Image (tube, rainbow, N blue to C red):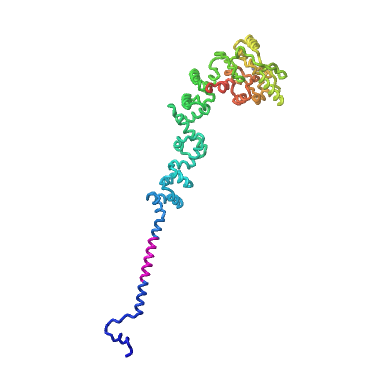
Amino acid sequence: MTSGGRDVIICGHAGRPALSADIRKDRKTMKKKRTGLTIAIIIIVLALIGGGAYWYTSRTEYKLGRAGYSKEQIEAIQSLFSEGEQTALINSPAQPDMITIARSDRYQKEHFEDYLKDLIGGKKAADILLDYDPWVITLRADSQYKEENLQLYLAQKIDGTPEDAAKIINYINMSLLYADSSEYDGSRFEDYEAYRAKFPDLDPKEIVHRVNRSGDYLKEDYFIYAYLEKYEAYKEKNPDKTLEDVIRAVNCGIDKPFYTGMVTTDMSKGYLIIVNKYNKLPENNSPKLESLAGYGNGYMEPTAAAAFRKMVDAGKEAGVKLRSHSPYRSHSLQTWQYQFWVDKHGQEMADRESARPGSSEHETGLAVDINTAVEEDHFERTKEYAWLMENCWKYGFILRYLENSEYITGYVYEPWHYRYVGEEHAEKIMKLGITYEEYYAYYINNPDYQ
Ligand SMILES: [Zn+2]
C-alpha cells in the first residue's frame, strides 16, 4: 500500500493518462526548432530579394536608363560600345548623339573619349566627326583650304595624300571663281589653269574669257592674246599658213613688208633693244664705246666689249682663234656702206646684204662680226663657229641671223654675226633656238604681260 501515486495512476479511471515531464520537454524543443527554421527561411527569402534587387540595379542597362537614355538608345549603346565605353556614358550626362557618331562612316574608335568630351562641351556631332577625320585633317592643313567649301572638297571622294588634298582644294576653289563668269565651261578647267599659270594675277573671269575666245591659238607656244585679232585677220588672208606661222608673222611684225611701218626702237630695253627692218635707232643714237684693241678691230659698248674679250680669252684656252672683224659702225659709216651696196647691186640686193642706216645692229655697239663677214668663207664650217655655238651664250652673246630665218630677221644666214644681250637671255635664246625677233616679241615686249 505504500506504492503511492503509482497506484493512483494505474488504477485511476480518468482515461487520459497524464503527460510525463519528458514528453513535455521534447515538445518544447520541437517548437523552438520550427521557429528557427521559419526565421532562417525568412532571412533567406529576404536575402534573395535583396540580392536580386541589388543585381537588378547594378546592371548597365539600368544605369544607362537612370543616366537618361531611352530603351532604344540603351540597346544601341550596348551593341555599339565596349563595356568600358558604356561605363563612360553612364558617368557623363546622357549624350545620345554618341550613337549617331558611332554609326557614322567617319567614326574613329580610338577617339571615343574625344567625341564624348566635345559633345559634353556642346559641339555638334557632325562637326566633331569632321574634326577627327584624317582626310578632313589633311584637307584643313592645306594653305588654300576654305572651310565654307569643305562639303564640296569632300564630294570629290578622294582620300589620299596632301597632294591630292591640294589638287582637290585648288580645283574646287578655282572652279567656283571661274564659274562666276557666264562663259564658264567646266570641261576647259585644265586650259584655264594652264593660262592662269602664265598669268597668275589675271582675274579668273578674264581667264575664262580669253581661253574660250582663243580656241586653238592657245595651244601655240608663242601665242599672245593681245594680238588675237591680228592673228585672225592674217590667217584669213593666208588660210594655208599654220597657226604657228601666223603667230610668228604677227609677233615679229613680218605680216608686212620690210621697212614698212618703221618705228623708233624702245631704247629703255637697254641690252635687250631690238634693231631691225621695222625698228630703227633714234637719230641721236651714240653709244658709249670702248676699244677692242688686242682683240681685233674697232669698238664696242663697254659691257659688251668686256664680255667679248672674256669670250675670246676662253676660246683661246679651248684652242679657237676669235677676233673682231667688224663691231660698232657709226651712222655715217653705215650710210656710206649701205650706199656702196646700193650702187653695186641695187637697192633690193643691198637690203638683203646690208642695213639701211639706223636699222643696223652694228650701230648699237652691241653687235660684232667675228673673223669674217663674207659667205664665201663658210665660217659655219670652222671649229671657231662650233665652239661659239656651244659657248657664246655663256658670255652673253647670241647668233643673231639664223639659217632659214631671213623672212623673219630680214637677213641671210650670218654665222659670223653675234649680238650681246647678257648671259641670262643669251642662254634662253640659244637653247630655244629661235630668232631674237621671236624672243623679243614674246619674252621682252609681250603686251599680255604689261
Ligand atoms: Zn654683222
Magenta segment includes 303: no
Examine the rendered structure and indicate whether residue 102 appears above or below residue 226.
below
- The reply to whether residue 224 is visible in this rendering is yes
| Quarter of image, res 104 | top left
Residue 57 in the figure: left or right of residue 445: left
Q: Residue at x 31, y 87 (%)?
A: 7
Choose between 379 and 28: the one closer to the eye: 28
Choose between 391 and 272: the one closer to the eye: 272
Choose between 63 and 264: the one closer to the eye: 63
User: How many numbered circles does the render carry?
Assistant: 0
Magenta segment includes 42: yes
Image location (x, y in percent) of residue 50: 39, 60
Choose between 424 and 427: the one closer to the eye: 424
| Quarter of image, res 364 | top right
Residue 85 in the figure: left or right of residue 297: left
Image location (x, y in percent) of residue 119: 44, 44
Examine the rendered structure and indicate whether residue 80 appears above or below residue 170.
below
In which quadrant is the N terminus drawn?
A: bottom left
Image location (x, y in percent) of residue 185: 44, 29
Q: Main secondary structure of the magenta part?
A: helix
Q: Residue at x 49, y 42 (%)?
A: 134
- The reply to whether residue 240 is visible in this rendering is no
Image location (x, y in percent) of residue 436: 59, 21
Residue 155 in the figure: left or right of residue 294: left
Q: Residue furthest right?
A: 294
Q: Which residues are magenta?
A: 34-50
Q: Residue furthest top?
A: 343
Q: Residue furthest bottom?
A: 1
